[in-house]
Amino acid sequence: MTRIIAVVNQKGGVGKTTTTVNLATALAAIGKKTLVIDLDPQGNASTGLGVEHRDRVVSSYHILIGSVTLAQASVVTSIPNLHVVPSNIDLSAAEIELVQEMAREGRLKAALESGADGYDYILIDCPPSLGLITMNALVAAQSVFIPLQCEFYALEGLSHLLKTIQLIQRRLNPELDICGVVLTMYDKRNKLTEHIESDVRGFLKETVFSTVVPRNVRLSEAPSHGKPAIVYDMNCSGSRAYIMMAKELLQREKTRISQAVKVA
């Protein structure tokens, strides 16, 4: 069964796209057929996976307005087992164009219901907002993955995001869960990082991944070369963290499936 995960945080610059691209690459590297849906008008995930702007004629915008299928919009990347639905600035118009449409929050879900077969994982890179585009991701997904920067303001944003997820669960997607929170830009030399980690782990318990993503210049350099960091420099600390994160995610998925079987 395809696992659909929305990578969400309404705050920008917390590592959403870096997490989406590198986690997807790590999953693909161990044989999981993976699709990244770039749902951010900035198109950074597309850039990070080496998709040139001239190759984004068909994009996630066209999926949301219903003019193409998922298969028609997906692009093969240079990484085996990894495809991407690219994005461009046209997607910013979807927020306005869909306002008057019926079932506007379910456009992406409808596209995935008829085209997700064949993928083990679909990761949705969301924009830094909680608007209609992100709503589409939350309605379509089974799980939410939250990258959380180790800074004070991130905690305030997390509280607002959790309330939004609860609202979606009540009204639009009762099956939605939080598969994990990951701490990014982690600097163990910084006392604030230690305090943020303690607060988040104390509040969210086992929801927080054991793996943390350190501050690492190679993670920042990789997109300019059109490559995930795992491909650009597999041995850097950031790449190693994302490889460990993928292993932890798979272990959590095994536990989830095992518990579901016991309940059944």
Image (spheres, rainbow, N blue to C red):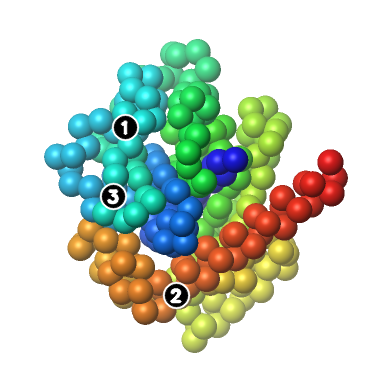
Residue indicated by mark 1? 73
Q: Residue at x 52, y 27 (%)?
A: 113
Residue indicated by mark 2? 240
| Spatial separation of the CA atoms under disc 1 and disc 2 | 31 Å
Residue flagged by tag 3: what amino acid is it? Thr
| Spot occupied by residue 181 in the image (x, y as percentages of width and height) | 59, 59
Query: Where 75 sits versus 50, above or below?
Result: above
Residue at far right of view: 263
| Spatial separation of the CA atoms under disc 2 and disc 3 | 21 Å
| Spot occupied by residue 37 in the image (x, y as percentages of width and height) | 40, 41
Residue flagged by tag 1: what amino acid is it? Ala
| Spot occupied by residue 50 in the image (x, y as percentages of width and height) | 23, 53
Q: Is residue 251 left or right of residue 182?
A: right
Q: Residue at x 52, y 83 (%)?
A: 188
Query: Where 186 sits versus 206, above or below?
Result: below
Foreground residue, 110 or 176?
110
Considering the numbered disc 1 on the image, is that residue within a helix, a strand or a loop? helix
Q: Which mark is residue 93?
A: none
2 and 3 marks in contact (CB < 8 Å): no
- Quadrant location of the N terminus in the rendered image: top right
Residue indicated by mark 3? 77
Residue flagged by tag 2: what amino acid is it? Arg
How many numbered marks have been drawn onto this rendered protein structure?
A: 3
